[in-house]
Image (cartoon, grey):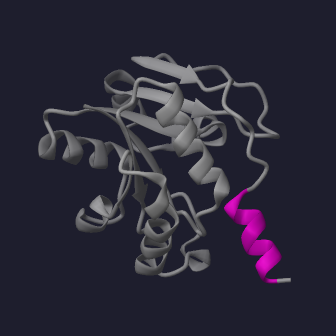
């Protein structure tokens, strides 16, 4: 099976996450999308993260009615911390050798991809689907196995950061 790994803090999960996961399932060759809830993101401020179990449960609750092809995963909760995408992908390949994994990231993450631990390993070994993000400046696409800009995907004008700001007003 072809599995899309859509990682994130999901702090909180919102209709943009859900909409993108559904669009990817309906418009690419992926059989499933696994929302990989990250217990911690080494590039983000931990003080703004809600409890990991709370974020996981809210993601599962949000995806219950979306069908079996979108799976909310706590796989990273069982890995050494901090969790790094390269390590997660290696662990997934060991655990599920029958699957082919594709990474799904936002354009903002592609712009800082060189800061990711072992970014070259990821680029050389995995397909990457990139979701366009408003306000991102043009970038040079790094050389990799296969990088596809999902420029035909609908734009969801929402972010977890904005939601958190509005909740604290």
Percent position of residue 84, x then y:
37, 52
Q: Position of residue 82 (x, y in %)?
A: 36, 63
Q: Of residues 69 and 83, which is closer to you in this image?
A: 69
Give the residue at x 47% y 35%.
25
Q: In front: 87, or 57?
A: 57
Q: Name the residue rendered at 50%, 73% in the picture.
A: 58
The reply to whether the magenta stretch includes residue 162 is yes
Q: Is residue 110 above or below residue 38?
A: above
Task: Give the residues drawn in magenta, as a range.
Answer: 159-168
Q: Which residue is at a point 72% across and 39% down the rendered structure image?
A: 133
Q: Is residue 89 above or below residue 161?
A: above
Query: How many numbered marks, from 0 up?
Result: 0
**Magenta span contains residue 42:** no
Magenta stretch: helix, strand or loop mostly: helix
Q: Position of residue 65 (x, y in %)?
A: 48, 60
User: Would residue 77 be seen by someone viewing this image from the given angle?
Assistant: yes
Question: Up-down: is 133 above or below 125?
Answer: below
Residue 165 falls left or right of residue 25:
right
- Quarter-wise, where is residue 149 in the image? top right
Which quarter of the figure has residue 102? top left
What residue sits 53% from the left and 26% below the top?
27
In the image, is 66 to the left or to the right of 164? left
Quadrant containing the C terminus is bottom right
Location of the N terminus (image quadrant):
top left
- Residue 60: x %, y % from top left: 43, 67
Q: Is residue 133 left or right of residue 53?
A: right
**Figure quadrant of residue 150:** top right
Residue 42: tell me if it is visible: no
């Amino acid at each position: 099976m072809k599995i899309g790994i859509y990682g994130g803090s999901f702090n909180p999960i919102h209709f943009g996450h859900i909409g993108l996961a559904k669009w990817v399932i309906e418009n690419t060759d992926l059989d499933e999308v696994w929302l990989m809830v990250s217990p911690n993101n080494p590039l983000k401020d931990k003080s703004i993260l809600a409890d990991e179990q709370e974020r996981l449960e809210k993601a599962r609750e949000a995806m219950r009615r979306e069908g079996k092809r979108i799976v909310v995963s706590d796989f990273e909760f069982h890995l050494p911390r901090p969790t790094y995408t390269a390590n997660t992908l290696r662990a997934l390949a060991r655990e599920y050798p029958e699957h082919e994994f594709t990474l799904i990231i936002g354009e903002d993450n592609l712009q800082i991809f060189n800061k990711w631990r072992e970014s070259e390993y990821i680029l050389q070994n995995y397909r990457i689907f990139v979701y366009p993000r408003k306000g991102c400046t043009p970038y040079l696409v790094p050389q990799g196995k296969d990088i596809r800009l999902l420029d035909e995907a609908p734009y969801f004008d929402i972010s977890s950061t904005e939601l958190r700001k509005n909740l604290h007003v």
